[in-house]
Image: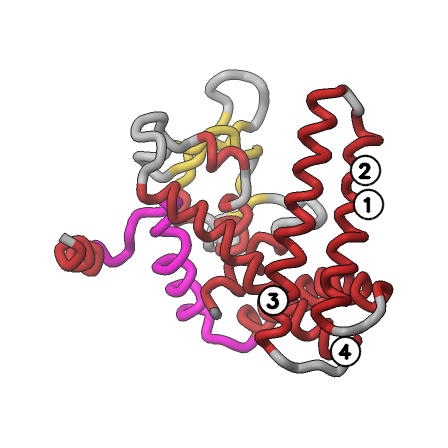
Amino acid sequence: MRFWLLLLLALLSGIGPARAWTHVSGDPIEGKPAVFLYEEKSIWFARSMTQGDGEFVPAKDLSLRDRQKLLISPVFYKGFPDKPAWPREKRNLLLLWIFSPVVALYLGFWIAGFIVTRELNPVRALVGFGGGWILGVLMFSVYLFFSSRIGGGAMTVLFGAGVALVLLSFYISAVYSCDIFKGLLIFLLQLFIAVLLTSTTLFASEKILDQHEVERFWNEKVFAPVGLIENPNPFQSINSDSSEA
């Protein structure tokens, strides 16, 4: 669970005011990331539109916060090779994107349900969370499909989002045996609590935990499995591959 929470924190930490990219040493890097070389695990920082005006920086030499920021950058995604279409690192990245928000949102839903209804049953929270999101996403997808087919535009999508929100509020209220407004409140409150949890965990990991261990955790459990940096423990990887075989 800690793994997914910390990853989600990194994703959220990338949202905020723009700042300069830096080395691990703290020295600033001129320019902006333009190209990620998958095989070399390095980034081309372009200083201007002029070809050749920039520098390559190994991803492992970026500061921890910038490695986290690179993880959600389109530059990193575009660096994956075309063949094979889904290498192991890309599959790992997809799993991270799917499961990390789910954990934070479920915890947020559980806490929100307790705050609103005083119901602390984790199973009920799981039923409400899973069913509510599935129902909401399905309904929104239907209206999104209709919008693309009949040319309804943004108004159709917004209307679909409203209908999905109402339906999942009814569903959550049925699960928690409360009125629809409390069901809506639970859903909206979970988003705020999820962000608060992730932000708090990120702050605590940087201020309380040993920074060497934090760096090691991110490098071994997040950055290396998704192909952002080279595996810092290649012998461990070889043993894992052998056991799988």
Residue at point 62%, 52% (across, down): 134
Quick one: label 4 or label 3, which is nearer the N terminus? 4
* Foreground residue among 114 and 199: 114
Quadrant of residue 129 within the rendered picture: bottom right
User: Which residue is tagged 2?
Assistant: 158
Disc 2 vs disc 3: which is toward the camera? 3
Quick one: label 2 or label 4, which is nearer the N terminus? 4
User: Which residue is tagged 1?
Assistant: 162
User: Which residue is tagged 3?
Assistant: 127
Q: Residue 38 location, x and y as percent?
A: 36, 35
Query: Label 4 near label 2: C-beta < 8 Å?
Result: no
Secondary structure of residue under mark 3 = helix
Q: Is residue 110 magenta?
A: no
Residue 192 visible? The answer is no
* Foreground residue among 3 and 153: 153
* Measured Cα–Cα span from mark 2 to mark 4: 29 Å
Type of amino acid under label 3: Val
Q: Report how many numbered discs are placed on residues in the image.
A: 4
* Measured Cα–Cα span from mark 1 to mark 2: 6 Å
Quick one: label 1 or label 4, which is nearer the N terminus? 4
Quick one: label 2 or label 3, which is nearer the N terminus? 3
Q: Residue 78 location, x and y as percent?
A: 46, 30
Query: Label 2 near label 1: C-beta < 8 Å?
Result: yes
Residue 150 higher or lower than 103, as above or below: above
In magenta, the rendered stretch is 208-235
Secondary structure of residue under mark 1 = helix
* Measured Cα–Cα span from mark 3 to mark 1: 22 Å
